[in-house]
Image (tube, helix red, strand yellow):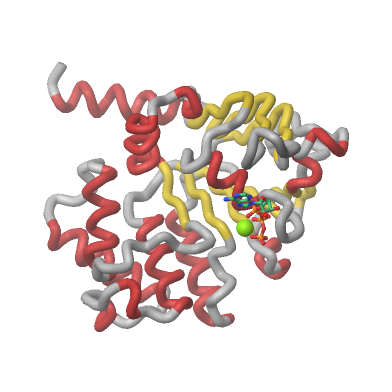
Amino acid sequence: MDLSEQKQRVQHREVEFTTAIEVTNLQFAYSKKSKPILDIKKWQISKGEHIFLSGPSGSGKSTLLNLLCGTLTPSKGKISLLEQPFSSLSNRQRDTFRARNIGVVFQQFNLIPYLSVAQNINAAVYFANKGNFKNTKEVTAATYQMLNRLQLSDSLLHAKADALSIGQQQRVAIARALINDPQLLIIDEPTSALDTDARDSFMSLLKDVAADSTMIFVSHDEAMKSYFEHHCSISQLNGSLGNSASSSSKDTTNPMQERV
Ligand SMILES: Nc1ncnc2c1ncn2[C@@H]1O[C@H](COP(=O)(O)OP(=O)(O)OP(=O)(O)O)[C@@H](O)[C@H]1O
Ligand SMILES: [Mg+2]
């Protein structure tokens, strides 16, 4: 099969799937002795949905996002992403899948501290290996554009990540998550260290770049809710409250979601 045939197959596959995320009988506990903090019977998110996920501090939001991006693995149950059995992949396959398909902004950012801003972003492009950029020059141009939209000065491009302020690190983590135009975006408290101007600019950038992606967005900031069509809370997802999720489709009257 030549390259163009391979591309066509991949493109065909991309339009084919309709379920972006499917969680089935998921349980997770940090230790074998403790009670699961997550117990989700069924949660399905269709391709292209943008979900605002809320819940009190300590309720398991970051834990769920870590399970969805494969930095934690379920104690029981399974997670399918883009209709692939994500939780059954080997660690290496999961890492490759994440690099290619998921843009993640962790609550603690997880930038590589001894690398510069440019190197952190280049590393994400390198590991994704999607062929979206012809050369480093193109990556740098895209990085400049993104940093500018996030109101981050060009002069920071060669600064080491650990020499940045918290708000600056957060914006670099956001740029790194978006640079590969991922199909899934998993974003944990992305605006907590941003001022109002940077926050509005970030949301407008996110809406642009995430138009064709599926996104789960966690925030304590209720003002962020208005950007989202769907809203779902951890307590509703957790079977312990007897409200297990069924579907995230816009057309169903899903108890898991309120239109906002
Ligand atoms: N590495 C860990 N080892 C053991 N327990 C943990 C670990 N990480 C989190 N927990 C516990 O799991 C629960 C859920 O934590 P999690 O970080 O998912 O909450 P959260 O909803 O994201 O909270 P916040 O809004 O404060 O970020 C908490 O009780 C926390 O103490
Ligand atoms: Mg958290």
| Residue at the extreme top of the image, as rendered | 1
Is 254 placed left or right of 169 in the picture? right
> Which one is nearer the viewer's eye here, 242 or 155?
242
| Residue at the extreme front of the image, as rendered | 33
Quick check: 240 above or below 171? above
Is 133 placed left or right of 257 in the picture? left
Q: Position of residue 123 (x, y in %)?
A: 24, 54
> Which one is nearer the viewer's eye here, 156 or 30?
30
Quick check: 115 above or below 244? below
Q: Residue at x 73, y 34 (%)?
A: 39
Q: Position of residue 49 (x, y in %)?
A: 59, 43
Q: Residue at x 37, y 49 (%)?
A: 181
Is 193 placed left or right of 38 in the picture? left
Q: Position of residue 256 (x, y in %)?
A: 78, 40
In terms of image quarters, where does ligand 2 lie? bottom right
Q: Which quadrant is home to the N terminus?
A: top left
Q: Position of residue 194 (x, y in %)?
A: 53, 77
Q: Residue at x 39, y 73 (%)?
A: 149
Quick check: 81 above or below 192? above
Q: Residue at x 20, y 43 (%)?
A: 131
> Which one is nearer the viewer's eye here, 170 or 9?
170
Q: Quadrant of residue 41?
A: top right
Quick check: 119 above or below 256? below
**Number of numbered discs visible in the structure rendering:** 0
Q: Which quadrant is home to the C terminus?
A: bottom right
